Amino acid sequence: MKENAQIPNQEFVPKHYSIISDIIYFIRYFKEYEPVVLFFSMLEIILSAIVPLTGIYLPKIAIDLITRKASIQEAVVILVLFTVLMAAVCTLKTAVAAGKYNYYNAQRDHFIGLLFIKKLKIPYKYTESGDMKKVYWKAYDALCSGDWSALSRMVTGTVGISINILCFLLYSTVIGTLDLWLLLVIDALAFASYAMNLCQIHYEESFRDEFAETNKKYYCILNSMEHPKSAKDIRIFGMKHWLVQLRDIVIEQQRGINQKIFRKRSFYEKAGFLLSMGRDLGAYAFLLYQALEGIIDAGGFVLYFGAISGFSGFITGIMNSLAELRSAANSADYLRAYMELPEEDTSSGNRHVSGLEFPLCIEFRDVSFAYQDAAEDIEDNGDMDNSHEVKKEKKKIFDHLNIRINAGEKIALVGVNGAGKTTFVKLLCGMYEPDSGQILINGIDRNEFPKKELYGLFSAIFQEQLIFPFTLGENIAMDRAENINEKRAWDAIDRAGLKEVFEEKNIDLKTYMTRYIMKSGANLSGGQQQRLLLARALYKDSPVLVLDEPTAALDPIAESEVYNSYNKYSQGKTALFISHRLASTRFSDRIIMLEDGKIIEEGSHNDLMQLNGKYAEMFHIQSNYYDEGEKG
């Protein structure tokens, strides 16, 4: 049996990884996909530590040359060589940093590609899950924010903190040659400053969730005010002042949070300044004493003075890099959580569909199924911070359902919205696994077949008219242009009733569909789009045809024409027609009416009309509606 774990009925919270763990994760990523980033990063760290170190030694060398009365020739040679060395190091450092920037930025697009591929590999239940959609878009945002993306900030933050720590250690070594106690005192004061900055960061992070909530409300209100779809309602119902008032309330909440953060930040900054000033004054007084006592010469005074002055900058640099890494790590948590989701097992199975006899017989035997989260109740517009979530209790869709679709039989599955029709299709096609019971194909448990072969048994046409902004041929074959069988594609187009239309519009297999990419792309009417989907199904020529309310957006006449075409070309196949409108029922061998996941009526159209039950009632209501429409 294939993995059948469901998602718990609660909001998904990604695992929180440590900064060290995130650094190791991205080091492994670059090692696999772009190791030159690691090489450039190491080189930049070493060069960046050399630059300030040479900076504090240059004044010492100059003063030493003066105090020992070196010749002008010697002084010029030494200073020129030292200056050339510094210039070379700085130039190389700049070039390395630029090269590293270009390489790791290019990897953002590559990682986005990996994220998209991951989305195609995970089980379908994760794709539909509202929580997983949220994680996906947060993971996507972690990659597509330019220099502010998690991947970029992990690189810059890691390099930055490495440089500052290395410089801190090198400067500590320099100071340690003067007096060990001085080094210990300065280090202790430096770490006290670090601790205060850390307290400031923790305090600001304590408001993160509160600020995120107000930010979510703000953009929700802003989108409601700006979205073209809202403009009519805002005018008709006089909502402008109400929305502006809501916006002002949220802005005031954000201002209150920012004021608290600013006051605490101001306190820590002042305390840190006083601590740094006391440290530096004490150290300078000690150096002055050492110089006056003749313990150190003028060159040594300048050297140690520069080393102590640099300490404060390196502590600040460590804190800034740490803050950058913390912020990047929060985004990286979502990225890693999504990339570590289990992938769908498409190859396991000890049987092959090639051994099946067609047409197929499909049976739901004692099948029970319940959604484990509120995935279907989340309206996702691509920006998860603006999604509207309506959580509900776990609801069982099917409870010991039994349906048998005989070989070559045409079944119409009807019922009102929410009856379980689309869920039935997802179970049928293998996108979900039942909680209990079996789905049999020719009497064999379908889990004995590899998923990739199982998917090939179905030509499914869904309510969403999925027309890609690719060529006509690619849209029909659902494959790359070089793999298209052109004769087969035109045969499918002809059988779907689109050949004459395409010839009149000069549309061929290389013509782009929609104008999303190409301005010259072809736009089709609703009925033509449905016929294009029929051509897609005919091209695939699978033994099972599944239509999940594909004509819901069409008028009754166009709907009847499309269903007649589907009926014509479903001969010799097992077919399932899903609808809450009854245009598909007359030519079906059998009609199954669902209500709340249960079969309440079953039989031919004439049988159910004579039964005068729910089906007959729905049929009469729809017929009266169409009759009144025609009279009107």
Image (spheres, grey):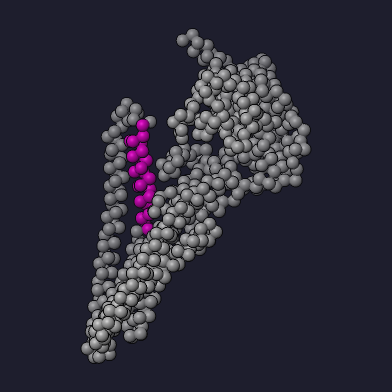
Vertical side of 444 occupied by 152: above or below: below
Query: In the image, residue 278 lies at what x, y percent?
Result: 25, 76
The span picked out in magenta is: 205-228
Vertical side of 209 occupied by 406: above or below: above
Left or right, 224 with respect to 13, comes to left
Query: In the image, residue 75 lies at what x, y percent?
Result: 27, 81
Residue 562: in sight, yes or no?
no
Query: In the image, residue 27 lies at what x, y percent?
Result: 50, 62
User: Between residues 186 and 234, which one lies in front from this camera angle?
Assistant: 186
User: Between residues 78 and 330, which one lies in front from this camera angle?
Assistant: 78
User: Between residues 187 and 616, which one lies in front from this camera angle?
Assistant: 187
Residue occupying image coordinates x 72% and y 25%: 572
Does the magenta portion include 227? yes
Does the magenta portion include 414? no
Residue 271 occupies which quadrant of the picture? bottom left
Residue 197: in sight, yes or no?
yes
Residue 439 occupies which quadrant of the picture? top right
Residue occupying image coordinates x 37% and y 58%: 205
Residue occupying image coordinates x 64% and y 32%: 485
Residue occupying image coordinates x 28% and y 79%: 76
Residue 395 occupies which quadrant of the picture? top right
Number of dots carrying numbers: 0
Query: In the image, residue 98 lies at what x, y percent?
Result: 39, 59
Left or right, 127 with respect to 187, comes to right
User: Between residues 90 and 291, which one lies in front from this camera angle?
Assistant: 90
**Secondary structure, magenta segment, majority class:** helix
Left or right, 106 with respect to 407, comes to left
